[in-house]
Image (cartoon, grey):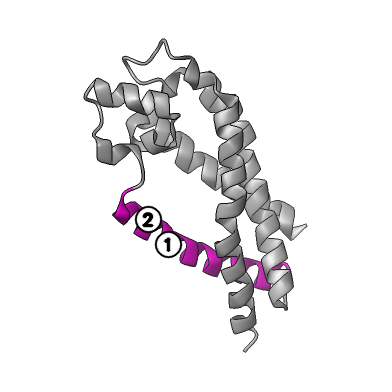
Amino acid sequence: MALWLESILGCAVFAMIFVGTTAKNPLSQIHNYPPAIQERCKKLGLITEGQMGYRKKDWMRKLIGIVLLGLVLGFLVYNFNDADTFFLGFAYSYLLWNIINWFDVIVLDCIWFCHSKKVIIPGTEDMKEYKDYLFHIKGGFKGVLFGLPACLLAGAFVLLFLF
């Protein structure tokens, strides 16, 4: 039961953050847009080359995020899912991660992003890439891999919480 509550809350929080920032200013999430849209925005002068991909400081923020996420997931699964081994800590947190990841791909990306006028950047309205479902699905598989380090850390934190 705890896993379902955590999943619903995790999906809700993720949706509020992603939808809120993207709807308010689509360019704030330009690194999550298909490359063709990023290129058009660059040609229009709306973004710079550095905003298109991940810069060194973005990777450092992601690394800190992975550690913090591992700590939070480890705390959650230890306290609410009765995870008392490395494997259970990893397994519960990885399941939770993937529920949120695929919610992002299916609901936020393929349903909301691909069909919302709020994400369309002026000057790119004609681009078919806004409905590039494969781009988002590939991103989901990257997300599966991206969650591994945080969930491995969650398993390690479960072991630390036992002491």
Picture residue at 25% right of the left edge, 31% below the top:
47
Picture residue at 61% right of the left edge, 68% below the top:
152
Would residue 100 be visible to someone looking at this image? yes
Contact between marks 2 and 1 (CB within 8 A): the answer is yes
Q: Amino acid at mark 1?
A: Leu
Residue 73 point in image, percent of width and height: 59, 64
Would residue 6 be visible to someone looking at this image? no
Residue 68 point in image, percent of width and height: 47, 65
Q: Amino acid at mark 2?
A: Trp
Picture residue at 71% right of the left edge, 63% below the top:
92
Residue extending furthest toward the bottom: 163
Residue extending furthest toward the left: 45
Count of numbered labels shown in the rendering: 2
Residue extending furthest toward the right: 1
Q: Residues within 10 Å of mark 2 (few under 14, many from 20)?
A: few
Q: What's drawn in magenta, residue-wise?
A: 55-82
Answer with the quarter of the image where residue 112 lies.
Answer: top right
Checking the image for residue 152, the label placed there is: none
Residue 51 included in the magenta stretch of the image = no
Residue 121 point in image, percent of width and height: 35, 21
- Which residue was labeled with disc 2? 59
Q: Is residue 11 above or below residue 115?
A: below
- Which residue was labeled with disc 1? 63
Residue 152 lies left or right of residue 58; in this view the side is right
